[in-house]
Amino acid sequence: MNSLLIYWRSMLPKPGLKAGESIPRIETSLKAAPANRALYNGLRKEWDLPDYGVVPPVFPAVATFMTHLKHLSDPKFPFQAMGTIHIRTVIDQIRPLRVDEVVSYRCWVEGHRLVERGIEFDMMTEASVEGKVISTTTMTMYRRGKGVKRDGPRPPNPVHNHMSAHDASWAVDPWTARRYARLTGDINPIHLSAMTAKALGFKGMMLHGMWLVGRACAMHPVQMMANKIRMESEFKLPVLLPANLRYRWWEDGGVLEMRVLDQAGVKPHMIARLSEMPTQ
């Protein structure tokens, strides 16, 4: 089934969740196969990633994007894909995946949580080599709707002006999103042109959130190759293309803090951190 057909199916009207219902388990296991070197090489160019022969922690979720989209287009899935927003990602990497390794993936979605003004659900990716799990990715999605009321005040905005922060600038043009879409299959119209994005009710053409995660990984390739690490990323504001972004990072108490900000270094687009994986 090609990408366009899967996208078309994911946009068909869906009934939503009735009282007492939840998202049923929808799971796919992909047969063991060599890691996708063509995808790796393409992403290396997009993210300016050094070729150490090891994929960044975000790679398994990117490599299985079409499997997750098939789950969203499954008749058992209760919602349309449009209107579903990727808000955060947590990656637990027991050890990194080498490009020359044979890897198998297991992807699933199940259940939901009531949150403020809507619901959340998790799309899961598990990567295994020789029957042993080496990484687990949790991509949390949000849908607006009937949710719960916030209990207490909103937390303050995060501080970005850490005294020991380092800075870099990223210039991102519309072709970046189009190339990434072609590589990964994520051809959502909001990522292809300002015209198609505006036709769907958005302010303009938007950059893929996972591109930001991968570009941040590429800034710290040695740290990302470590064993037993957790990378958490939270998306705050969409990046409208073209864009000039400011990237800031620093280490604090053994945690690598990462921020993707607007050109002025004020408004956050993505907040991420790399730390040791919690012990079970």
Image (cartoon, grey):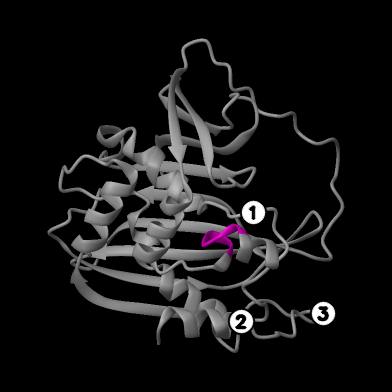
Q: Name the secondary structure under disc 1.
A: loop
Disc 3 residue type (three-letter): Ala
Disc 2 residue type (three-letter): Phe
Q: Mark 2 packing: few (<14 Cα in 10 Å), some, or many (20+)?
A: many
- Residue 26 showing in the rendered view: no
Mark identifier at residue 19: 3
Mark identifier at residue 77: 2
**Can you tell which quarter of the image residue 267 is in?**
top right
3 or 1: mark nearer the eye: 1
Vertical side of 75 occupied by 230: above or below: above
* Nearer to us in this view, 213 or 113: 213
Vertical side of 55 occupied by 159: above or below: above
**Can you tell which quarter of the image residue 277 is in?**
top left
**Can you tell which quarter of the image residue 143 is in?**
bottom right
The residue depicted at 42 percent of the width and 51 percent of the height is 176
Left or right of 265? Residue 18 is right
Q: Name the secondary structure under disc 2.
A: loop
Residue 74 image offset from top left, x and y in percent: 55, 85
Left or right of 92? Residue 123 is right
Q: Is residue 272 magenta?
A: no
Question: Which tag, 2 or 1, sits closer to the chain's start?
Answer: 2
Spot the residue most to the top: 163
Question: Which tag, 3 or 1, sits closer to the chain's start?
Answer: 3
Q: In the rendered image, which residue does mark 1 sit on?
A: 204
Residue 14 image offset from top left, x and y in percent: 70, 84
